[in-house]
Amino acid sequence: MKQLVVTAAVIEKDGRILLAQRKPDTHMGLKWEFPGGKLEWGEDPRAGLAREIREELGIDIEVGDVLEVVSHTYEDRHVVLMGYQCRYVCGELQLLDVQDVHWVRLHELKSYDLAPADVPIVDRLLRT
């Protein structure tokens, strides 16, 4: 079983949070998640998250504090997911490496078919 270190951006803009839908041919295909991705070897987590968001969505973000750290085991992998509070800075949102995106209000997050590793981040957001 492989272990991955992954970052996720909780991007807020105008009172809404950005969710991204995974492409159908990927692990957890068509599930919704906070956008982000795997870190490259030796990469700073904040820099890696900003890179992943540019690659997947074509936008720039400001990466803030860690909101939640999740340890989740899927059938074929163990994921350590670091969720960061982020702020949209600039850029035109594009579907470069995601199926779809939605800007949602906090109370709407649980209505999406979320990737299991992202659920504890949602729970944390709903508690604050």
Image: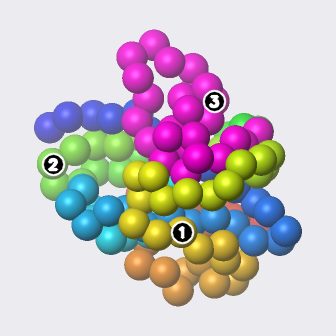
Q: Earlier in the sequence, mark 1 or mark 2?
A: 2
Which of pointers 3 and 2 indicates the residue nearer the eye? 3
Q: Which residue lies at the image location 80% right of the left edge and 63% below the top edge?
A: 13
Please give the range of residues in magenta. Answer: 37-62
Image height of 98 relative to 5, above or below: below
Q: Which residue lies at the image location 21% right of the left edge and 60% below the top edge?
A: 25
> Residue 33, position in %: x, y?
48, 62
Say which residue label 3 marks: 46
Say which residue label 2 marks: 76
> Residue 69, position in %: x, y?
55, 44
Say which residue label 1 marks: 101
- What residue type is disc 2 on? Asp
- What residue type is disc 1 on? Val
Q: Earlier in the sequence, mark 3 or mark 2?
A: 3
> Residue 48, position in %: x, y?
54, 29
Which of pointers 1 and 2 indicates the residue nearer the eye? 1
Callout 2 environment at 10 Å: few (<14), some (14 to 19), or many (20+)? Answer: few
Mark 2 lies on a secondary structure that is: loop
Q: Is residue 76 magenta?
A: no
Q: Which residue lies at the image location 56% right of the left edge and 32% below the top edge?
A: 51
Mark 1 lies on a secondary structure that is: strand
Q: Which of marks 3 and 1 is nearer the N terminus?
A: 3
Q: How far apart are marks 1 and 2 (CA)?
A: 26 Å
